[in-house]
Each structure stands twice: as structure tokens, then as C-alpha cells.
Image (cartoon, rainbow, N blue to C red):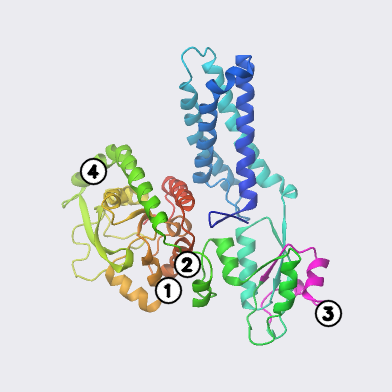
Amino acid sequence: MIRIFNHYVHRQTLLQVLTDSGLLVVAMLMVFAWQLGSVDKLMPFAGTHVLSLAAGMLVIGTASGIYQQSGNLSLVQTCARAAMMLLLALPLTYAIFALLPGDFLNRGSTQFAAMCGMGVVVARRVYLTHWSSNQRIRSRVLVFGAGPAAQIVSHTLQASDPNVEIVGFLPGPNEKELAVPAAGVLRSDKSLLETARTLAVDEIVVALTERRAGSMPLRQLLDCKLSSINVYDLATHFEKRLGQIRIDFVNAGWLVFGDGFNQGALRTAVKRVFDVMFSVALIVLSAPIMIGAALLIKLDSRGPVFYRQERVGSNGSTFMVTKFRSMCTDAEKDGKPRWASAQDDRVTRVGNFIRRVRIDELPQLFNVLMGHMSLVGPRPERPYFVEQLTQQIPYYAVRHSVKPGVTGWAQVRYQYGSTVEDSQEKLQYDLYYVKNHSLFLDLVVLFETIGVVLTGKGAR
């Protein structure tokens, strides 16, 4: 894993993105050089268009999920993501090179070459994902522990990263009960460092169930770290592998004395400028969609077009959030707040559609302009539920240290939540965002939100 502006990115993902972008850029520069016959004329004609194509591929690739590191993706799923990427990328490629100067005689052939190049790059990505696993750079991980915590770590690694190889589980000194497969348990009289060197280990995850005196060989772990072997505790493991802070494996000391959770004035100012610029642009671009949605809502059911509801914002302050009405007007006629649920009978026909494609959230862009919300942040919740969840879930109030968002890290990483358990799962992603938020992470969330909208993932 590589940390970019506090956000963890798979090394393999970064390598794939850079390789694909580089191949596409080189191919297009060769096409231009061949057509122009002179390198001197290359950049004035090609520079902006080629770089725009590379940037567009980056955004679309992230949104489609084709670079997602997961060992559970089937060939059909990868091909579906590739098809989605091509469906968006090919028209964009055609449009970018349609803007070539009028005196450029080979515009059509350039557009064709660029679209072919994009198709080849995507096809190559599908091939490498499923038929070239032997070429992957695999990371060898030793799990120090063999109890329930080690079992969770094992499942996490297998599900989240196909480039990781677990070399075995080394039981701690005081661990009596094993929860991992016996075949993977290591027995060694050597020191931890010697064992790690023998197995050519790149990383050690400390997953001890029993951590009382004598259970944690700190000196041996330090020796491993000094020998260029990465050593991670459970909380850091989940943070970098899953992009979440697991509240069952973290303590207040880790949150207080660790890095992150920075809310500086500069970061706040940059985020506010970013929010205003992008929300204005999105309002202009989505205006026809919002007008159409308003007309459909009015024709479909009686009641107002917009729905206003009190939500909890930063530092526990409340504000009125604005959304397109997607439910019937008497959705809570008994006066009791209710979670939205799958197949909710309170949702109208038009409401079902605008929820699926997230159109109902668009009026919140005006909340962003007014300063109540940010484009990216934890989703704002109703005071009634906040009071309950704060009492039932540790660290829940931490999410209110930043402005709530129209979209968020939890929204692109987890399905729609309608229970306390779902709220706890989403909180773990919200804590990661609050700890590591940056402009880079905001852009990642916005790109992935495009994929969520296109696939209808988690809609309710």
C-alpha cells in the first residue's frame, strides 16, 4: 500500500493506472508525430487533447471500478465494468479529438486511432486481471496470532487484495485457542525476526487475541521493523486495507496519539473554495435534470416538489436539508421517525427512480452553497437517530467534527444503512474519512460516486 495525502492506495492499482495512461499517451503521441511529420509541431496540436484523454480515462476507470483490487471479481463482472468504461470513454474520446484545430486534415483517422487505443487498453486490463496473475507483484504477509482476530485479518486480506499471500499464522505466547486453519499454523523455535526472514516476509500483522504482559514481544517486533519488514497493529491494518477504522479493534489512545484528525484553517478554506466551485458547476450542469425531476414529481403524486428535514451538521448544530420528495406526503403520519428500507411502500413511482440514480440528492447542492454541507463528508442524520446512535455506538459523535456531505466515503464503500448495525459499519468508514480527509480523498470519493450512480449500488 502507498499513502498519498494520507489516503492509502494499492501499489498495484497505482501501477496499473500509470501504465495504462502511459501506454495511451505514448500511442497517441506516436499517431500525431506520424501524421504531422515533425516533433516540433507535436505539442501545440497534441498536448491538451492527449492529456485530457488520459485524465478522462483516469476518472472513468475509477468510476467504473475496473481498477478495484479484489480477488472475488468474476470474469463476467470485470467484463461488465470494462463495457461500462468503454460506453463512457469512447464518446469522450471522439469528442476530445473532434476539437482538433480546423486545419488539421486527419481528424477522422485520429479519432478512430484514439478510440481503438482506448479499446486495446481496456481489453489489456481485462486480460491482465484474469489471465496474468503470475505476473503480479505479490506481498508476503505473516499474521502474528492464531485466534479470532487473526481469522478476521485472514478473511480481510483474501477478500480485499488478490496480490497478498498469507505465509502462515504464528500463535502468540499466551494463545491457547486457535481459530485459523491448522494447516496454516506455524511452529518455530526461532525468533520472530529469524522466522520472518526464513519465510521472506514483507509484512507482519499483529493480531493477538491475548495482549496482556508477556503476550507482545515488542523487542522482536522492533527488530523486524528495523530490518525493513513492515509491522502493523490491527487498527492500522484495517485502516490501510479496507479504508475504515474498526471500532472493535481501536482505542481512544490510538485515535488521540496517532496522526490524522487535522481540522486546520487552511484545509477548511481550501475545502470551502472547492465546494463552492464544484457545487456551482454541478448546479448548472444538472439544472435540466432537476427541472425534469420536479415536473415528474408534480405529475406523479400530490404534494410539494421539495422535502425539507432537520439534520445534524458539524459540531452538533442542526440545519434543514433539502431534497426532492421521493415519498408520499404522509410517510410518517404517526409522527415516529422510521429508517428507509428496501421496497419501502412509502416511496412513490418517480421517487423510486430518482432514489436509484441519486437525483433526489441534487437539491443539497444549494445546502453546500449556503455552507451547511460539503460536497464530501459523512451523511447528515436526523437528530432522533443521532441521539440513539451516539448512546449505542462508540465514537459516533466524532463524525460531527466535519461538515456533512452530499456524498461520502461510507456511501461509496457500503450499502444503504437502515439498522444500528449498518450505522456502525458506515461509522467505521466515516472515521477513516475524518482522520484522513484531504482534497485528494474528496476527488476519489467524487469519482467513485459516479460509478455508484451509474450502477445504482446501494440505492434505497
Residue 203 included in the magenta stretch of the image: yes
Q: Nearer the viewer, mark 1 or mark 4?
A: 1
Label 3 with label 4: CB-CB less than 8 Å: no
User: Can the viewer see residue 208 in this picture?
Assistant: yes
Q: Which mark is residue 428?
A: 2
The Cα atoms of the two marked residues, 3 and 4, are separated by 72 Å
The Cα atoms of the two marked residues, 1 and 2, are separated by 9 Å
Which residue lies under the disc numbered 1? 395
**Residue beneath the point at 31% across and 63% down:** 313
Near-viewer residue (371 or 166): 371
The Cα atoms of the two marked residues, 2 and 3, are separated by 38 Å
Position in image of residue 325 (x %, y %): 24, 53
| Residue type indicated by callout 3 | Asp
Left or right, 157 with reference to 383 = right
Near-viewer residue (120 or 47): 47
Q: What is the number of callouts on the image?
A: 4
**Residue beneath the point at 63% across and 14% down:** 37
In this picture, which residue range is highlighted in magenta? Answer: 178-205
Left or right, 85 with reference to 314 = right
Q: Earlier in the sequence, mark 2 or mark 3?
A: 3
Near-viewer residue (348 or 221): 221
**Quadrant of residue 321 within the rendered picture:** bottom left
Near-viewer residue (95 or 71): 95
Q: Which mark is residue 201?
A: none
Position in image of residue 372 (x %, y %): 28, 57
Q: Secondary structure at mark 1?
A: loop
The Cα atoms of the two marked residues, 1 and 4, are separated by 41 Å
